[in-house]
Image: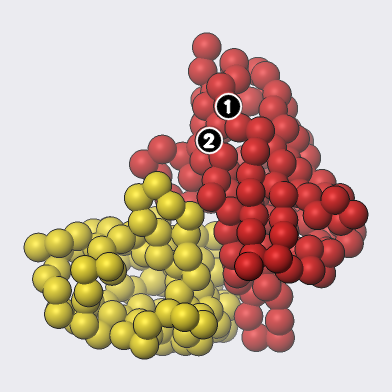
Chain colours: A yellow, B red
Amino acid sequence: DIQMTQSPSSLSASVGDRVTITCRASQSISTYLNWYQQKPGKAPKLLIYAASSLQSGVPSRFSGSGSGTDFTLTISSLQPDDFATYYCQQSYSTPPWTFGQGTKVEIQ
Amino acid sequence: EVQLVESGGGLVKPGGSLRLSCAASGFTFSSYTMTWVRQAPGKGLEWVSSISAGGTYIYYADSVKGRFTISRDNAKHSLYLRMNSLGAADTAVYYCAGLYSGNYSVHFDFWGQGALVTVSS
């Protein structure tokens, strides 16, 4: 199975900060990498698909990049609504489709 | 508006069984691969099982293979998960999700609100 490793596991940041979360796959997954945001008690929400495509309705301060094994989610200017947990997920080939362990973004 | 509504969660004793349902509306259910994803309390997301649009292709995580059965009824716009031989490790919120599958992307496009399954004596 393909393992996904996110870093950091958590981070503290202030409103307006630029935030970067990384995700590494245990083998090449091309650009079959998605990013989700989850708030407490809520279902995950798709932010970025195919490594860099912004889901409809998602603010442009979110961006994704990478291919192969290394990927990045960037929030260009952190807003109060962005404090949440972020997960990467690979969808390369057939299942199992695995998630990273999550990165919790907290208020500094 | 796309809606997925899970039901059937609850408290079950170790070794017991439970059947989750997911009622879909607002999209062409019969065209979508559907998936169950779970999240144990305070933990991350775990893909559990997927079923193709017509039900031909079915996949399970190793952790549930042989104990869980996914199925769907396209006429009723419904997805199901039959869970047998439940153990404490199966305690989680179970999400129903619709999978978009295209040439360059496969992703969970939309999600239900989740159903809590608690396995405890």
Chain identity of mark 2? B
* Image quarter (top left, top right, bottom left or bottom right) of the N terminus of chain A: bottom right
Residue B121 versus residue B28: which sits nearer the camera? B28
Tell me the amino acid under the disc marked 2: Leu
Relative depth, front residue between A80 and A70: A80
In the rendered image, residue B77, in percent from the top left (x then y), is placed at 80, 54
Q: Residue furthest front?
A: B1
Residue at image position (59%, 65%) is B110
Q: Badge 1, how many Cα within 10 Å: few under 14, some, many 20+? A: some
Q: Circle 2 — which element? A: strand
Write down the residue under mark 2.
B116
Respond whether the residues carrying marks 2 and 1 are from the same subunit. yes
Point out which mark residue B10 bears.
1
Return the x and y of residue B65 as percentages of the image width and height: 72, 40
Neighbour tally class for label 2: few under 14, some 14-19, many 20 plus, Cα within 10 Å: many
Q: CA distance from mark 2 to mark 1?
A: 6 Å
The mark total stands at 2
> Do the residues under discs 2 and 1 have CB atoms within 8 angstroms?
yes
The numbered dot on residue A63 is: none
**Quick one: which residue is furthest to the top in this view?**
B121
Q: Quadrant of the C terminus of chain A?
A: bottom left
Q: Residue at x 41, y 87 (%)?
A: A65
Is residue B71 shown left or right of residue B20? right
Q: Residue at x 33, y 59 (%)?
A: A85
Left-right relation of B75 to A90: right
Note whether residue B68 is visible. no
Callout 1 secondary element: strand
Residue flagged by tag 1: what amino acid is it? Gly
